[in-house]
Image: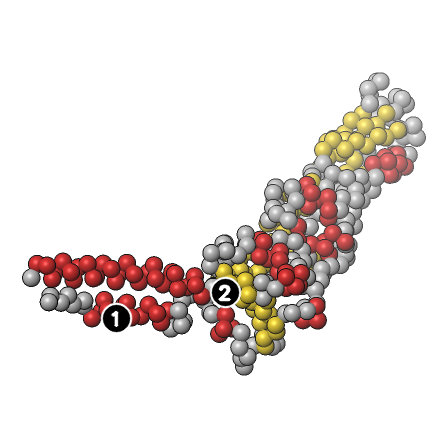
Amino acid sequence: MTHFRFPIRVAGLICLLPLASCGWLSDSGPLKRSIGKDSDSYTLINVTSQADIPGKSRTYGVGATPPSIKGQGYSDKVRSRDSLDFIVTDLTEESPFHTKGEPYKFGPVEVPEDGSISIPYVGAIQVMNRSLSQVSADLEAKMKPVSNTARVTVVRSNRMPRTANVIGEVRKPGPIPLERAGITSEDILAAAGGPSDAEHLYKYTLRRGGKDYNFDYLGYRRNPFVVEEGDLLTVSADTDNRFHVMGAIIKPSTVPFPVPSPTLADALGAATGMDERRSDPSGVFIFRKGNPDLVYTFNLKDPRSMHLAQRFPIVGNDIVYVTEAPLSRWNRLISQLLPTAVSQAGNAFARYQTN
């Protein structure tokens, strides 16, 4: 009788196949039975009723109205770098401002930082933080020693725009003109096109007078404030509003909160659900960092757990882990080992025939 001998390593590979079903060969991610045991490093909570569900995932409303430093962001009163024209009408021929039917014009004059402007025949006059009508009245009063009949009109011919800035995760970052009084925090966010994604995924930081004032999305919405010149609003990602989905999931990834206060059901849906070919619905775990660290376990084969999953709150940086079904591990291991075993057996048989 002719005997055919397999190489030892081929026979060894074939012998290893039954061990896979016993979990002897490791795979990526922990097994259900290894998680579902008491451990000194975490507290395991089997969620089977409403009493096992912790409180809400996160409370919002951080932030308060910042103190005013400059007052209104826009004012009609004269400020530095405004350009003013002075128009004097005087019908008295002896007046130095009489120009034979044409008004006497002086300007344009750019207002300096100290707000003092020198007017011919009058001298220096203070215009800073005064309305145009107030400047006109003051100038007429100062002209009395020269002419009792002079009438003055002050016109602003140019004004440098005052702005606030919005930067970061908005659709149109950049300077926002403060073109009227009472422009609010909501106005400048809207003028910048709003956040790049859902507003709850961001935090908002106002820098005013060298100090930072922080808001979450709800605090920013609930505490509107009047914007001042030079304000800087930064919109950045709120890293506390994301979680991680791993294991036998269609799309394992780090996921932004789909809603401000997501549940386990929201989390699984945001990751496009469990992989039906690989997942074990009886082994769904939520790993939560804390003191102590917690691991919540769900058996989603139980219809009652499906309702609990719709109430279980997810908090920032939770890890949602779906274990893999034992049969799936077995099938994948077979697919990995069997081609190798068959190939080596074929090579051995070919060598046997040539001998």
- Where residue 213 appears, as percent x and y from the top left, is 69, 58
Residue to which mark 2 is pinned: 323
Residue to which mark 1 is pinned: 12
Q: Is residue 53 above or below residue 209?
A: below
Q: Is residue 264 visible?
A: yes
- Where residue 109 appears, as percent x and y from the top left, is 73, 34
* Numbered disc in front, either 1 or 2: 1
Q: Quadrant of the C terminus?
A: bottom left
What number of labels is visible? 2
- Where residue 197 appears, as percent x and y from the top left, is 61, 47
Q: Quadrant of the N terminus?
A: bottom left
Amino acid at the residue labelled 2: Thr
Q: Toward the viewer: 326 or 164?
A: 326
Q: Is residue 234 visible?
A: no
Residue depicted at 77% across the width and 54% down the height: 223
Q: Secondary structure at mark 1?
A: helix
How far apart are the alpha carbons under marks 1 and 2?
A: 29 Å
